[in-house]
Image (cartoon, grey):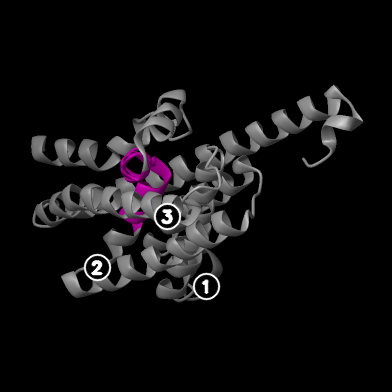
């Protein structure tokens, strides 16, 4: 039981981390550090990106072999690389609360799917997982892009900065996945695994719903503040 609780804590640890927003320290690092700083901040962003990691945790629960893990993580990575690089380069933006709300929904979705929610509730098979992982990867990448675009990138080495940040994100993702996969493989051998599986996936649903509510609250609060500030402040909202 001690091993079970320790594993549960390690797997859900990202959920109790601080939000992975843009800090003044990150901005100072990018201003002073060059391309290497973008790699560093990208890795840090992913390692503290609890919503991204919770979604990946939900995906990994479904997979058994290394080949499957590699295939699904590659598809997810391809998805978020497309929107991270493309949206940032083209300057496509959206309200970060709404983007993060959809990411939160992806966390709840994966927990719901892992518990056979589609069969139990809708009496229908779940959508193709590989396609959904790719689709959510696109959304997660757009979320990463909104964070990167909150920095002042400047015109100098613009594409190189985007690519460097993306490399950092991939490094952070690998570093985060190693302990998650290790713990999952260990706990799968324990008698308590069925209970562990159910509890953690219920936790994903609850965490996703809570994050969704939090982000929607943030969106409507910021929107109301903008409206109260006057019509002029709505330009470009």
Among the two numbered marks 2 and 3 on one chain, the one whose residue lies closer to the N terminus: 2
Determine which residue is flagged by label 1.
123
Q: CA distance from mark 2 to mark 3?
A: 29 Å
Among the two numbered marks 1 and 3 on one chain, the one whose residue lies closer to the N terminus: 1
Where 67 falls versus 33 (above or below)? below
Q: Is residue 37 magenta?
A: yes
Q: Position of residue 130 (x, y in %)?
A: 40, 74
Q: Main secondary structure of the magenta part?
A: helix
Determine which residue is flagged by label 2.
69
Q: Is residue 47 magenta?
A: yes
Helix, strand or loop at mark 2: helix
Residue at 15% x, 49% y: name it.
Answer: 183
Q: Position of residue 75 (x, y in %)?
A: 37, 70
Where 42 falls versus 111 (above or below)? above
Q: Position of residue 151 (x, y in %)?
A: 53, 37
Magenta part of the chain: 35-58
Q: Is residue 229 visible?
A: yes
Give the left or right position of residue 194, taking residue 40 as reference.
left
């Amino acid at each position: 039981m001690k091993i079970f609780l320790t594993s549960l804590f390690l797997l859900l640890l990202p959920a109790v981390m601080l939000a992975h927003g843009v800090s003044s320290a990150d901005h100072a690092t990018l201003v002073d550090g060059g391309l290497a700083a973008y790699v560093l901040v990208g890795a840090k962003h992913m390692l503290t990106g609890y919503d991204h990691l919770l979604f990946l945790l939900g995906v990994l629960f479904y997979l058994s072999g290394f080949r499957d893990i590699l295939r699904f993580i590659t598809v997810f990575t391809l998805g978020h690389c497309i929107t991270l690089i493309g949206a940032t380069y083209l300057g496509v933006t959206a309200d970060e609360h709404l983007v993060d709300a959809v990411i939160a929904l992806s966390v709840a979705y994966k927990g719901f799917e892992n518990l056979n929610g589609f069969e139990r509730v809708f009496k229908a098979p779940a959508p193709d997982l590989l396609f959904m992982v790719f689709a959510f990867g696109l959304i997660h990448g757009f979320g990463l892009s909104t964070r990167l675009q909150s920095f002042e990138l400047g015109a100098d080495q613009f594409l190189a900065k985007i690519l460097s940040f993306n490399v950092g994100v991939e490094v952070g993702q690998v570093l985060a996945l190693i302990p998650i996969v290790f713990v999952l493989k260990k706990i799968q051998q324990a008698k308590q695994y069925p209970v562990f599986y159910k509890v953690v996936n219920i936790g994903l649903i609850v965490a996703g719903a809570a994050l969704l509510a939090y982000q929607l609250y943030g969106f409507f609060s910021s929107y109301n503040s903008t409206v109260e500030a006057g019509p002029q402040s709505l330009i470009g909202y």
